[in-house]
């Protein structure tokens, strides 16, 4: 809720974008935040999607994953694949407009001194109940901005590949916001994602997943277009 987050439960500053809302990072949809970022401005400068150089390999000290210098929420998301190469997405919605829905990857904002990788695994466990996962390489980076639950979210999202043999999910770890904005989880095949007419974040996820399955992880993280609503 990609997409959706725990700030409301912990009184922290908001983290990022979902979802997607987070594919959908509780994600985040909240997972965090609904995983989101909902419309695309493909001409946004790609450089703006690049996080500060010092972030990689260091620990973010800002509460709730927020970079106080730039007011951008630092978010980690997980592209979780099972043994059949299906991807797990959360189904998020706007709390006040339940018919406005989208799918997003699990994920959410950094907490305390977490690294991006640590946050990815924690959010995955909290939002899906899956702890038996092997975290792989960093696949993509993107910046997004969107309104959700009465506030504006600005997020710097990093997407990690992860693999698991477990397909059963558990939402007991969802925050109050996630319980109000996530209706379920689903494993999607690449083919299902490609023909779906439902809203998914990031918007190019079907294409990105197909490339990942055909060619393997990129040699360096791919900078995705900025999505801003």
Image (spheres, grey):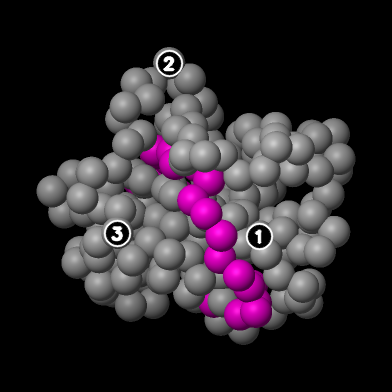
Q: Residue furthest front?
A: 219
Q: Looking at the image, is mark 3 or mark 2 earlier in the sequence?
A: 2
Magenta range: 126-153
119 sits left or right of 71 in the view? right
Residue for badge 3: 57
Residue 66 painted magenta: no
Dot 2: element: loop
Q: Looking at the image, is mark 2 or mark 1 earlier in the sequence?
A: 2
Which of 175 and 66 lies nearest the eye of the viewer? 66
Query: Which corner quadrant holds the N terminus?
Result: bottom right
The residue under the point 77% across, 73% down is 165
Q: Which mark is residue 46?
A: none
How far from the left and from the top, in percent, is residue 82? 77, 63
Q: Main secondary structure of the magenta part?
A: strand
Give me the C-alpha separation between circle 3 and circle 2: 29 Å
Give me the C-alpha separation between circle 3 and circle 1: 22 Å
Q: Is the C-beta separation of discs 3 and 1 under 8 Å?
A: no
Residue for badge 1: 80
Q: Residue furthest bottom?
A: 172
Residue for badge 2: 43
The residue under the point 49% across, 35% down is 222
The residue under the point 23% across, 44% down is 53
Can residue 218 be seen? yes
Dot 1: element: strand
């Amino acid at each position: 809720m990609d997409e959706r987050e725990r700030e409301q439960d912990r009184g922290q500053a908001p983290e990022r974008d979902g979802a997607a809302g987070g594919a959908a990072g509780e994600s985040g949809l909240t997972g965090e935040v609904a995983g989101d970022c909902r419309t695309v401005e493909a001409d946004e400068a790609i450089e703006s999607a690049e996080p500060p150089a010092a972030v990689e390999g260091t620990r973010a000290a800002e509460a709730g994953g927020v970079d106080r210098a730039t007011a951008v929420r630092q978010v980690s998301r997980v592209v979780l694949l099972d043994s059949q190469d299906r991807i797990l997405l959360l189904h998020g919605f706007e709390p006040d407009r339940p018919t406005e829905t989208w799918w997003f990857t699990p994920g959410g904002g950094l907490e305390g001194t977490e690294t991006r990788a640590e946050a990815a695994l924690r959010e995955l466990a909290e939002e899906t109940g899956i702890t038996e996962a092997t975290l792989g390489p960093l696949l993509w980076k993107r910046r997004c901005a969107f309104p959700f639950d009465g506030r504006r979210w600005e997020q710097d999202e990093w997407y990690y590949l992860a693999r698991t043999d477990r397909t059963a999910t558990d939402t007991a770890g969802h925050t109050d916001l996630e319980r109000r904005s996530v209706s379920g989880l689903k494993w999607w095949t690449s083919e299902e994602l490609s023909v779906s007419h439902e809203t998914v974040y990031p918007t190019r996820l079907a294409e990105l997943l197909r490339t990942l399955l055909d060619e393997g992880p990129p040699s360096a993280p791919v900078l995705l277009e900025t999505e801003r609503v």
